[in-house]
Each structure stands twice: as C-alpha cells, then as structure tokens.
C-alpha cells in the first residue's frame, strides 16, 4: 500500500485542515468580539446557532452517506453517486432556505431576540450555497485525496475572513454587514467546492450507478432521526441560556462552552477517515478482531494528544479566554473548564463503528433517551436552581451518559467487555502525567512577575511541555508510535 495514501496520512491532512480552520475561526471570533458590541455579537452567534441546529435535520444524514456508498461502489460509479446526492442536497437546500425565511419570527420570539428576525431573513439564502457541498470532505477522504479538502478548507476560511471580518473592520461594525459577508463567502465556497468535485474523477470512465435514492435514504434517515435528537442535546443549553439569561450571557457561554478544538480536530478527522474503512471491512466480512484492533489503536493515539492539552487548558482556562476574546470574556473560563471533562471521555468516534455495524436505529434510540434527559433536567434547573453553570454541568453529564450507552452497545454486539476495548491503564497513566505537569506549570507561573497574557501562556506551556515529555520518557511512553510506519495499518 502506498504510504502517502494510508489512513494515517489522510487523517493527518484532515487534522492540518481542521487546525487551519480552527485558527481562522479563532482569529475571526477574536476580531468580531472586539468590533461588535456584545448584543450584536450575540445576535450573530444566534444566527449561526439556528442555522447549524437546523442543518443537522435538513442534511438528512447525507454527508455520511457519501463515505458509506462510495467506499462500496466501483470508482466508475463515483461521479454518478456524487451527482445524485448533490442533487438531493440542492433541493433540500431550497426547502431549507424557505423554512429559515418563513420561521425567522418564530425563532426571534423563542430566543427572545428581536434583532434576530431581520438577520435570519437576510441569512436564509445561505443553505442554497452550502448544502450542495456538504459531502466534499467525505468524497475526498474516500478517494484518498484529503489534501484537496485541506486546500479547500484553507480557501473557504480565507473567504470567510475577507468577506465577514474585513467589511466589519473597514465599513461598518454591524451584525448585518457580518451576515451579508457570510452569504457572499458561502457563494464562493460553493463554486470552489463544486469545481473540485468535478475535477476529482475527470479522467475516470463514467458509469451510471445502480444505487437508488430510496437506498440512500434508508441509510441516511436513521441518521437524520439521530440528528434530530442531537439537535436537542447540543442546543438545549443554548436555548435555555439564551432565553432566560439574555444575549450577553449567551455570548459568554457560547465562547467558553466549546470542546477543546484540538480534541475535535483529532476526533473528527479520525471519524471521517474511519467510516469508509469500517464500511468496507463490514462489507467484506472482515474479522471483528480487525475492528477492535483499529479501535484500540485510535483510542491510544487520540488520548496521547487530547489528554495533555485538555488538562493544561483546564488549569489555564481564564488566560486562554482573555487572550482569545478579550478581558470582557474572562467569565467564559468557567464554561471552558466544565466542558473540558468531555474531552477526557470522547477520545474515540463511536458513530463510524455503529453505522458500519448496521446499528443506526440503536444509535438514534440512545440519542433520543439522552435528549429527553437533558431537556427535563435543564428545565428543572431553570425552575429550581437557576444557574447557567448548572446548565453546563447537566449538559456534560448527559453527554457522558450518551457515550457510555454507545460504548455498551458496541461491546454487546462484539460480545466483549469495555475493559477489552478501552486501554484504561494507558489512559490513566497519561492523565496522571498531564495533571502532574500542569500543577507544576501552574505553580511556577504564579511566581512569575507581571507579564502579558500571551507571555504567561507561552512560558507556562513551555514549562508544561518540558515536564510532561520528561515524565513520559521516564515511564516509557513514546510518541514516535503515532507516526511509526509499521503502525500505519491502524490509522
């Protein structure tokens, strides 16, 4: 196998793309937070919140269907499959745009944000541009061209920076200018994405696919149902905080209550690469042990990256928030610490295994149960113990419950215990070393003279990295395993 096309390299390319995307997003958020008032910035975040929430349902699970079907079909049918799914998403995008426009008043009332109505109506054309290219990541990864998607990601973020942030700085610091720039950026992304998809299989002989639309929907509809419950899981806390605590608290919460971006980069990249791999393994009736080996390999590699970064971020949450968003968002640190716990649990993507094993209905049921739990508990919190911090705690507890149920389902299907699937001993050691290095770094940083936030973070992370790597060498934990060629069969 060509190492340059291995799963490791594909994951690395996706990781680089995600890192670049995150960097641009942080720059964009940092600038908008400073130029827009808290009220207008909160409204802008609400627009994106409404769109991303509805997108989970309106996408009908089709982005994952690209990987599932393209991995099983001959490459000659690739163009036909892509066109069929793109056409489905184009019509869905038109319907999505109409719904977004017509329900703008409803969302403004529900979120108690009068300014949201006009912004949503302006924004409503966006699904026409973004939905037809939702599958570009899965397409490129399935055909081992993740580097093309990374290039697309870089250009799309540049479009966003130039079309959204630049006009706010140069012309008018208003939420309407930001929304208008986002629309134009989406149009440019659409044109570029469709062009790259067209070029991908240009020299491949085209054959019409035998896959019918109802087959695609049979796979994707359960994902859409799970996505519907996922909307509730992800948006319940945002809804309650936006409605009962207002735009300013919502802005603080939305900036802080985000999973460690580096953790998301690792997990999302692995999930995108693993879905076509698992789909192919199940389709070829590969031995279950190969799936278990792949899972454990991903788990330990993810933990080696996620655990130390998560623990360091927990200890230095406040200066991180101040550095990124400014002193007015120092209170976001408490939410950043609360959600950090999830990063220690979500080290392996569960969805690819569940979908490849044909457990999409169980996947949806677990998310349904989690959604019901989170709504009931957060409603009781608002009525009995009103606090946005408790809302955040409830959210992560329900998320951990969901992950535990997914793990139980996978173990039951494979007839193994969780102890056989999760490398607990190695994970515990990584956590202890990360805590030790973070505590020492925090102690040393408290003795430093008054310095800027960026200087303090730089010195603290340098101390942490040196201590952590020395401890790893002392106990025999090697990071060269992640890149070792003989391990490329895993990821």
Image (cartoon, rainbow, N blue to C red):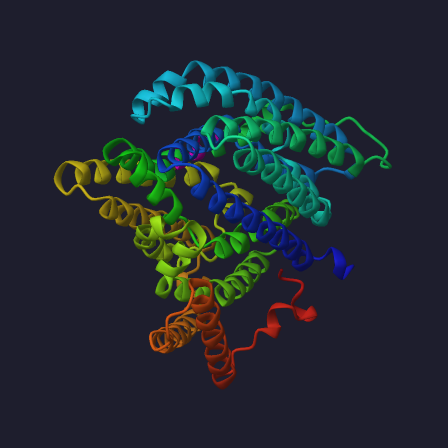
Indicate the position of residue 288 as horizontal and vertical percent values: 56, 56
Residue interval drawn in magenta: 224-230
Above or below, 65 relative to 429: above
Q: Position of residue 324 (x, y in %)?
A: 45, 53
In-image side of 211 versus 167 (left or right): right
Is 226 covered by the magenta stretch?
Answer: yes
Q: Position of residue 479 (x, y in %)?
A: 57, 73
State whether residue 67 appears in this view. no
x and y percent of residue 466 in the render? 50, 78
* Quarter placement of the C terminus: bottom right
Q: Main secondary structure of the magenta part?
A: helix
Indicate whether 300 appears above or below 54. Answer: below
Q: Nearer the viewer, residue 67 or 459?
A: 459
User: Where 261 falls versus 434 (above or below)?
Assistant: above
Left or right of 378, for residue 254: right
Name the residue rendered at 39%, 66% in the picture: 311
Magenta span contains residue 290: no
Nearest the viewer among 419 and 133 is: 133
């Amino acid at each position: 196998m060509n190492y340059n096309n291995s799963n490791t390299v594909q994951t690395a390319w996706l990781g680089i793309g995600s890192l670049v995307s995150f960097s641009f997003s942080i720059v964009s958020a940092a600038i908008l937070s400073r130029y827009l008032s808290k009220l207008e910035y909160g409204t802008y975040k609400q627009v994106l919140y409404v769109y991303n929430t509805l997108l989970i349902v309106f996408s009908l699970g089709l982005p994952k269907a690209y990987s599932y079907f393209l991995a099983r079909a001959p490459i000659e049918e690739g163009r036909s499959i892509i066109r069929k799914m793109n056409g489905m998403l184009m019509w869905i995008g038109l319907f999505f745009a109409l719904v977004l426009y017509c329900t703008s008043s409803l969302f403004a009332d529900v979120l108690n944000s009068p300014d949201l109505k006009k912004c949503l109506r302006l924004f409503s054309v966006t699904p026409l541009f973004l939905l037809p290219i939702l599958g570009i990541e899965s397409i490129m990864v399935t055909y081992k061209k993740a580097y093309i998607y990374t290039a697309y990601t870089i250009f799309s973020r540049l479009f966003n920076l130039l079309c959204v942030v630049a006009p706010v700085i140069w012309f008018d610091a208003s939420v309407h200018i930001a929304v208008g720039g986002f629309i134009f950026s989406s149009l440019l992304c659409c044109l570029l994405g469709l062009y790259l998809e067209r070029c991908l299989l240009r020299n491949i002989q085209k054959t019409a696919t035998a896959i019918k639309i109802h087959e695609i929907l049979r796979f994707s509809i359960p994902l859409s149902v799970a996505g519907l419950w996922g909307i509730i899981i992800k948006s319940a806390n945002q809804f309650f905080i936006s409605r009962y605590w207002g735009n300013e608290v919502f802005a603080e919460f939305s900036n802080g209550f985000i999973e460690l971006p580096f953790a998301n980069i690792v997990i999302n990249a692995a999930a995108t690469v693993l879905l076509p791999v698992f789909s192919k393994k199940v389709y070829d009736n590969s031995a279950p042990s190969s799936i278990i080996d792949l899972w454990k390999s991903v788990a330990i590699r993810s933990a080696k990256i996620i655990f130390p970064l998560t623990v360091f971020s927990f200890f230095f949450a406040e200066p991180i928030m101040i550095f990124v968003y400014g002193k007015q968002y120092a209170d976001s640190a408490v939410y950043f610490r609360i959600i950090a716990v999830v990063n220690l649990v979500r080290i392996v993507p569960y969805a690819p295994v569940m979908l490849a094993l044909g457990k999409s209905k169980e996947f949806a049921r677990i998310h349904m149960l989690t959604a019901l739990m989170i709504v009931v508990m957060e409603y009781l919190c608002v009525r009995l113990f009103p606090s946005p911090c408790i809302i955040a705690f409830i959210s992560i507890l329900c998320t951990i419950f969901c992950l535990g149920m997914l793990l139980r389902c996978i173990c039951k299907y494979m007839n193994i215990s969780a102890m056989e699937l999760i490398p607990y001993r190695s994970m515990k050691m990584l956590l202890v070393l990360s805590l030790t290095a973070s505590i020492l770094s925090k102690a040393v940083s408290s003795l430093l003279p008054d310095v800027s936030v960026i200087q303090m973070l730089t010195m603290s992370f340098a101390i942490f990295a040196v201590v952590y790597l020395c401890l790893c060498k002392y106990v025999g934990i090697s990071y060269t395993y992640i890149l070792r060629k003989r391990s490329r069969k895993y990821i």
